Amino acid sequence: MPPRLTVVVHGPEVRGRFAECLESVERQVTSGRPGVEVVVAGTDAGARRLAGEAAARDPRFVSLPLPDSTPDAEARRAGAERASGEWLLFLRGKDRLPAGALRAATGATELCGAAVESRPADVVLMDHVRTTWHTGAAPSPDGPLLARAGHAPVPPDARPELLGVAPLLGNRLVRSAFWAAHHEVLAAGNERYTAYALLLVAGRVACADQIVLEDRVERAATLPPPTADGPFGLIEPYVAADSLLTSLHRPAALRHRLYDLMTHEWLRVISARTLPGDAAEEFFRAASRAARACRPPGHERPEGLEGVRQSLLEAGAYRGYLRLAALNDRRRGLRAGVRRQRRKLGGKVRARRYQGALERPLDPRLAVFSAYWDRGVACNPGAIAEELRRLAPHIHPVWVVSGARVPLLPPGTDHVVPGTPRYSEVMARATYLVNNVNFPNAVVKRPGQVHVQTHHGTPLKCMGLDQIPYPAAAKGLNFRQLLRRVDKWDYSVTANAHSTRMWQRAYPSGYTELEHGYPRNDVFYAADAERVRAVRARLGIPPGARALLYAPTHRDYEATWSPRLDLARFAERLGPDTVLLVRGHYFYSGAPTPLAGLRAAGRVLDVSAYDPVEELALASDALITDYSSIMFDYANLDRPVVVYADDWEVYRRTRGVYFDLLAEAPGPLARTEDELAEIFTSGAWNDPASAAARTVFRRRFCEFDDGRAAERVVRRVFLGTPEARLPPVLPLHERTPAPTPEEAVRR
């Protein structure tokens, strides 16, 4: 059998990058990735030596020595000719394969490369991350576009917007037969040209928003001397791609889209103002000539400033462009000034109002609650507020809720919207402030105020200061401000000793740990058979059906969430008596697909917007998750938990984790969709080995969750009950979780 995928690594060894590139490939190939071949086309002595060493270690590596300074296009052509795989992935020697990339790539070829009306995909577009000397693995902007496009192969003219995906070759999987049939055209230019040519020539294109490339951008000072064409090298690839498109007689929409992309790129170079005056004008003139030559008949310019800039480029009006740029700079400055003044004035009014409220005494009967950045009544704060009504009805709860979420509040919920006069009043005068995230920086911690941080999960992934070594996770975080917010905490609620230790190191400050359990998990011990039956009936789960809750987590390195499973295929393999409850927004459209039919039949239910999530747990027979903290909460039910860790290496590397989930999973663990299906069809999901692993997991992570967590928090914080007089935590073997769906039917 020929390999499924051939990775063509090409280029010279410069500053150790080629060695790092090969290491990134070799780690994944030697870890047991089947159906992968690697052709290494080295173009200098160092690269040739490394290629030979890799081939000597592993027969799946093929060394293809090429003469010094062989152009990249020739190296790619030679590598493709030597390849025997069904699909090709070109990788420059300066770049790397992120962990899990080969798994994602081979999976994408299986998912996207299947024939649709006898027309399989020729090219599969995938996502990438970009690393510079000062940033690591920054997400690309392509994720949402790839997610919306979906897996189904379509003609490129059906989705001309796909031309906007970064013009790289490492983010494109190419069917070998397609490359062989068109290699003279595809390999006729540089990488940018070939990236576009692949999409223009392809009969069908598919998309997958998983990451297969780490594009490494070197500092200018470390690069070889610039070529003679300099920025002018950005003109010819587009002109050649336009010429190719014209010869192919493709629909006009593709040419119009390509034209907007090329003029936008040329104008970006000009507006960056990195070229000296004469060179800038010369580039503008050259781009202007190319724009006039490539402008499609009947092309409508973009609206607004972009369209004006495009018209000036076409007219060759360099002086006019400079005047427009200067005018626009002044206009932006004026608008920014007006916005700053408005914000400043509004901020002063709110600050004065808040300051006035701060001078009034605290209200000992007032408590402010918020959850998930003002989303509404939920999570641990919601459970605490409910218990407060029972044990301390003299304390009045007020919820902070964003304006858009107000209509979703339970009837009669007293609330305030941030920025309003009453918001300033309650934030300044409440004695108790409870949140599962942090309150804004501007909130003043007054003497006598009590801040309760409940958190919203047990940490597997790194949090707080522990995120600093992981750029994708730390992006946009100000850790000094974070610590100032943490310093306002009086209490930190934890569900287990592991959480206590991790919060202490991630959020170092002087607060008191409340090892009382998570109040939101009390329901897992309080719910009876009637409630389990009622939730299943609300969801439309047929009596006797097996309901599996699929709840994956967010990934910092992906722009949008998409399922890591082919839900239609997975549901079919599990059979008609299984219902999938999918907790997450997926990109399958409402078009006639196998998934649409399964949704109509009630076998796949999108429960992404269903709240509270605890009810979904009660309704399900088992949980499928990856690295979500829901596994720690769900374990309280003592029902099967199956972990699907298809990209564990990528997640661990980009996010950071506190323990090895693969070694300490709460139940069966799958690395592929086939393995996951086998767990459920074979019965391994609910066998004695699964129960034994779950017992160990529950003992460690359900340590303080016994159904009375909210009571302990309310008595300790709001009623001042000493720690020694609080209800003791019930030992694990004495707890009785809510009945399973099967037990609920019998009661």
Image (tube, rainbow, N blue to C red):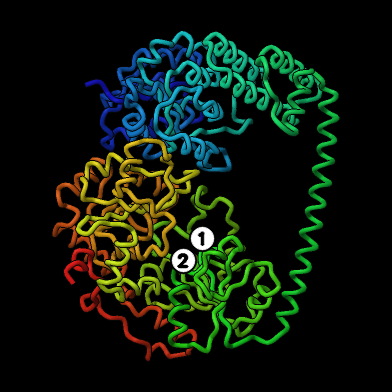
Q: Residue at x 42, y 22 (%)?
A: 204
Secondary structure under the numbered disc 1 in the rendered image: helix
Residue type marked 1: Leu
Can residue 280 be seen by looking at this rendering?
no
User: Where's residue 221, x and y in %?
Assistant: 63, 31
- Quadrant in which the N terminus appears: top left
Q: Which residue is mark 1?
A: 465
Badge 2: few (under 14), some or many (20 or more) residues near its Cα, within 10 Å? few
Q: Is residue 112 visible?
A: yes
Specify whether 263 is left or right of 102.
right
Vertical relation: 139 (above or below) 347: above
Is residue 134 placed above or below 734 in the rendered structure?
above
The residue under label 2 is 505
**CA separation in Å, label 2 and label 1:** 8 Å
Sequence-earlier tag: 2 or 1: 1
Q: Are marks 2 and 1 in contact (CB under 8 Å)?
A: yes
3 or 69: which is nearer to us? 3
Towards the viewer: 455 or 335: 335
Q: Secondary structure at mark 2?
A: helix
Against 203, residue 427 (above or below) is: below
Residue 380 in picture, x, y percent from top left: 44, 71
- Give the quarter of the image for residue 286: top right
Q: Classify residue 16 as left or right of residue 743.
A: right
